[in-house]
């Protein structure tokens, strides 16, 4: 790959990949993960997790799927690689970042709505407001 990093310090995404691949090692080999991503061999995965090469942005979704993680935070980490800090800021401005807790709420909505995209009703809004105000949130001043 032509985007080999010369930075001796490991990027956050390299640290994340190393940790996540280790967490999955009881179920998947690094070779299995590489194949799921679409790489012929696992050398590229080794280089990405060691920080010797950058994670290609066009592979983030397949990497996330192979690592069984949400693609959005992985994409943000990929954007934070050397030279991409401006892209990360633009990405965050466009779509924002979700915490793991927010992602869990979104996954629950998708599960309980059978994957539909339900509109926010007045009742739903009141229920959410009651839940989050009870949990210490301030809620909105108006409905």
Image (cartoon, rainbow, N blue to C red):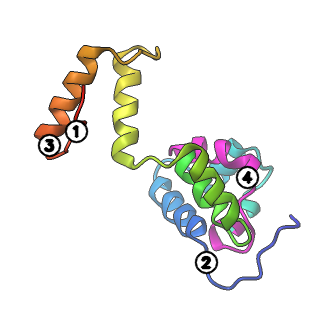
Residue on which the image places disc 3: 135
Q: Marks 3 and 1, how far apart in space? A: 10 Å
Whether the magenta-drawn stretch holds residue 67 is answered as yes
Assess whether mark 3 and mark 2 are in contact (beta carbons under 8 angstroms).
no
Residue on which the image places disc 2: 10
Element type where label 4 sits in the image = helix
Assess whether mark 2 and mark 1 are in contact (beta carbons under 8 angstroms).
no
Give x and y (percent) for residue 136: 14, 47
Q: Marks 4 and 2, how far apart in space? A: 17 Å
Q: Is residue 24 above or below residue 122?
A: below
Whether the magenta-drawn stretch holds residue 129 is answered as no
Q: Earlier in the sequence, mark 2 or mark 3?
A: 2
Tally of numbered discs: 4
Residue farthest along the left direction in this orientation:
134
Residue on which the image places disc 4: 57
Q: Earlier in the sequence, mark 4 or mark 2?
A: 2
Give x and y (percent) for residue 89: 61, 59
In which image quadrant can residue 132 be found?
A: top left
Q: Is residue 113 left or right of residue 96?
A: left
Q: Is residue 132 above or below residue 75?
A: above
Residue at (73, 66) in percent of width and height: 54
The stretch of residues the image draws in magenta is 47-70
């Amino acid at each position: 790959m032509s985007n080999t990093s010369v930075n001796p310090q490991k990027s956050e995404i390299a640290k994340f990949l190393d940790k996540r691949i280790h967490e999955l090692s009881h179920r998947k080999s690094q070779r299995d993960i590489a194949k799921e991503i679409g790489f012929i061999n696992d050398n590229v995965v080794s280089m990405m997790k060691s920080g010797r090469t950058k994670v290609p942005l066009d592979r983030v979704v397949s990497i996330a799927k192979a690592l069984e993680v949400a693609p959005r935070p992985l994409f943000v980490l990929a954007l934070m690689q050397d030279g991409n800090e401006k892209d990360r800021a633009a990405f965050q401005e466009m779509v924002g970042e979700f915490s793991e807790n927010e992602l869990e709420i979104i996954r629950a909505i998708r599960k309980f709505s059978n994957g539909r995209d339900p509109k926010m009703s007045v009742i739903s809004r009141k229920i959410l407001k009651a839940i989050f105000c009870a949990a210490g949130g301030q809620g909105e001043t108006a409905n």
